[in-house]
Amino acid sequence: MTQTTEVPTPEAVEELKTKIKRLNSKAGQSKMDLHDLAEGLPTDFEKLPEEAAKTYEIFRELSELRKQLKTWEAQLK
């Protein structure tokens, strides 16, 4: 993800908020999928690395987008 030094528009901030909201929903589902998989261990243990990596990536991206939103909101003040 690249961050620019330009001040974002209010519309861009709203689009980012929408993206975060959608990704947050996806993160919650991924967390539950990982939880369900863990509860069923040792069954399907082979799926654990892939599911964990997917969940990690979603939460990493969500963290980055939240940081970007915080920066953008500060720039608009």
Image: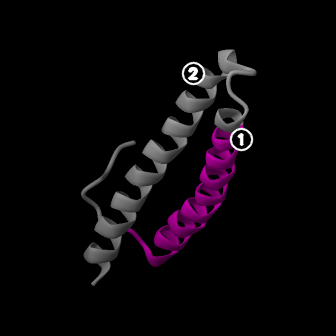
Earlier sequence position, callout 1 versus callout 2: 1
The amino acid beneath tag 1 is Asp
Q: Is residue 59 left or right of residue 74?
A: right
Which residue does the numbered mark 2 point to in the structure image? Answer: 49
Q: Is residue 27 left or right of residue 2?
A: right
Magenta residues: mostly which secondary structure? helix
Query: Residue type at mark 2?
Result: Pro
What separation in Å lies between label 1 and label 2 (alpha carbons)?
A: 14 Å
Which numbered marker is on residue 75? none
**Is the C terminus in the top left, top right, bottom left or bottom right quadrant?**
bottom left
Instruction: Specify few, some or many for label 2: CA neighbours under 10 Å numbering under 14, 14-19, or 20 or more.
Output: few
Percent position (x, y) of residue 6?
29, 62
- Read off the residue under disc 1: 36
Q: What residue span does the magenta drawing correspond to?
A: 7-36
Q: Secondary structure at mark 2?
A: helix
State the SS at label 1: helix
Image side of residue 44 versus residue 38, left or right: right
Residue 11 falls inside the magenta stretch: yes
Q: Are marks 1 and 2 in contact (CB under 8 Å)?
A: no
Q: Nearer the viewer, mark 1 or mark 2?
A: 1
Classify residue 52 by image quadrant. top right
Q: Residue furthest top?
A: 46
